[in-house]
Amino acid sequence: MRPLLAALAALLPFAAAAQDSAAGFRPHLAQEVDIGLYTVGTTSASDAARRGTSTYLYGELAAGLHLAPGFSIQGVLAFEPIGEGDALGGTPDGGTTFFRRQSAFLEALYLEWKPDADTTLQAGRFVAPFGRGHHDFPGILTRIRAHEVNAITDSLGFGASRTFLSDPVFGEHDISAAIFTLDRTFLSSTLATRRRCCDEAYERFNRNTRAQGGPGNTGQMDNAVLALDGDGFEWAPGLSYHLGVLTRGAGDDGTAREWGYTAALRYEQRWSPTQRTLFFAEGVQFRNAAARPRTEVTLLGFDPDTGDEVETMLDTSIRERRSFTTLGVQHRIGEWRGTLAWQRDQRKRSVEAVPTENYVEASIGTDLPYNFSIDAGYQYGRYAREEVGGLGTSHAVLMRLGWRGF
């Protein structure tokens, strides 16, 4: 943490110099809100605990304090339930839950400096620039499910991006990079909703610690992301791409370095001034997912002398290759939109096998006055059953009332 603070302090003279060189500039605050009230009504599920209705807030408030031309302090306050699976409907257990384990926390707080129009430097707490879908997938739950799998949050370190090619024919291309560690400072704490006694469903309720382990939780700046983005092609208007590679070291519970790879495409076809179709796809894969954590496996055998069945505990590690795929299309007619998306979460493991999950979501929505929007849809799911194993089937009705403003 001390080297990071020293680096932040070193940027202040640049901010002062920039302010002196810009006549008429005044510090100001810019903000943006994108938040939704979600309702997931699971009408049918193989597990009774999944049936019922969950309502919660999910979204973010972003703000930037611009202290000088090109120099600012950026922050993002995220709102979401912090229980296990709550952001995707959770386990209402046949009833109705309102804002259960609802919380807020700082997803990002960093200094940003733009020495020129093509370069951006960052230092602080941020979401590493790995995947794309968790930020901009259309639909209702598609973005949330991507966030659960491949958003590299709680990243504390340094980032940079630069536009290295800008051409009318070949498009505009950016390269981004970040080095970071898992944030264990007080900034990783939740701002509301502390864990209740004996409720193990809380996924986060206090600041990160070394003891919790996990990939990236090394205490060192030995985790990194490299990404490429491009759009603005003259020969393919509406086409954009994203490529990324990630590496994270093993925490105390891990045995190997995790590697991640992602590729995403978006293409928007405009048919008329009021109609357009967006096609989107993203594939993410983690090798040594979760940094190959240690585990104990129970082996059944027989005593050679008595013939009785005996159990033996074997210390091993979980070698996992996790692939998360999204394919979808959205068509817009004026203020109305319809979205169809398919998502697959496949986890190939050496031990403790987990079946492949598949979800199909269909929704329609429209923009409303005063920056409000509403979407309603249906989701069919084939999910992994934790208690009894195998796959379960679920059907759910979805709704989102959103508001976006400045």
Image (cartoon, rainbow, N blue to C red):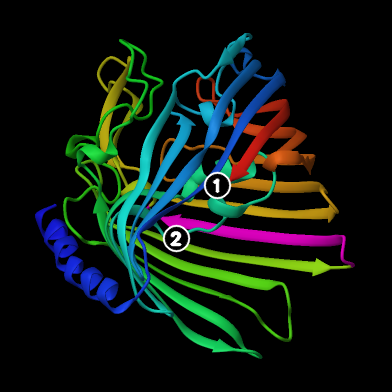
Q: Earlier in the sequence, mark 2 or mark 1?
A: 2
Q: Residue at x 57, y 14 (%)?
A: 97
Q: Nearer the viewer, residue 286 or 110?
A: 110
Q: Disc 2 versus disc 1: distance between alpha carbons?
A: 12 Å
- Quarter of the image for residue 17 reads bottom left
Measuring from the top left, give residue 59's x and y in whole percent.
Answer: 53, 39
> Mark 1, residues whose alpha carbon is within 10 Å: few (<14), some, or many (≥20)?
many
Q: Residue at x 51, y 37 (%)?
A: 354
Q: Which residues are magenta?
A: 272-288
Q: Are marks 2 and 1 in contact (CB under 8 Å)?
A: no
Residue that numbered label 1 is attached to: 146
* Residue 395 visible in the displayed image: yes
Q: Nearer the viewer, residue 192 or 54?
A: 192
Measuring from the top left, give residue 251's x and y in whole percent.
Answer: 22, 46
Q: Is residue 279 magenta?
A: yes
Label 2 is placed on what type of residue? Answer: Phe
What number is the disc on residue 130?
A: 2
199 vs 260: above or below = above
What number is the disc on residue 104?
A: none
Label 1 is placed on what type of residue? Answer: Ala
Measuring from the top left, give residue 337's x and y in whole percent.
Answer: 81, 48
* Residue 320 visible in the displayed image: no
Mark 1 residue element:
helix
371 vs 261: above or below = above
Q: Is residue 173 left or right of residue 399?
A: left
Q: Magenta stretch mostly in which secondary structure?
A: strand
Q: Residue at x 42, y 66 (%)?
A: 245
Q: Nearer the viewer, residue 220 or 65?
A: 65
242 vs 118: above or below = above
Q: Is residue 338 magenta?
A: no
> Mark 2, residues whose alpha carbon is within 10 Å: few (<14), some, or many (≥20)?
many
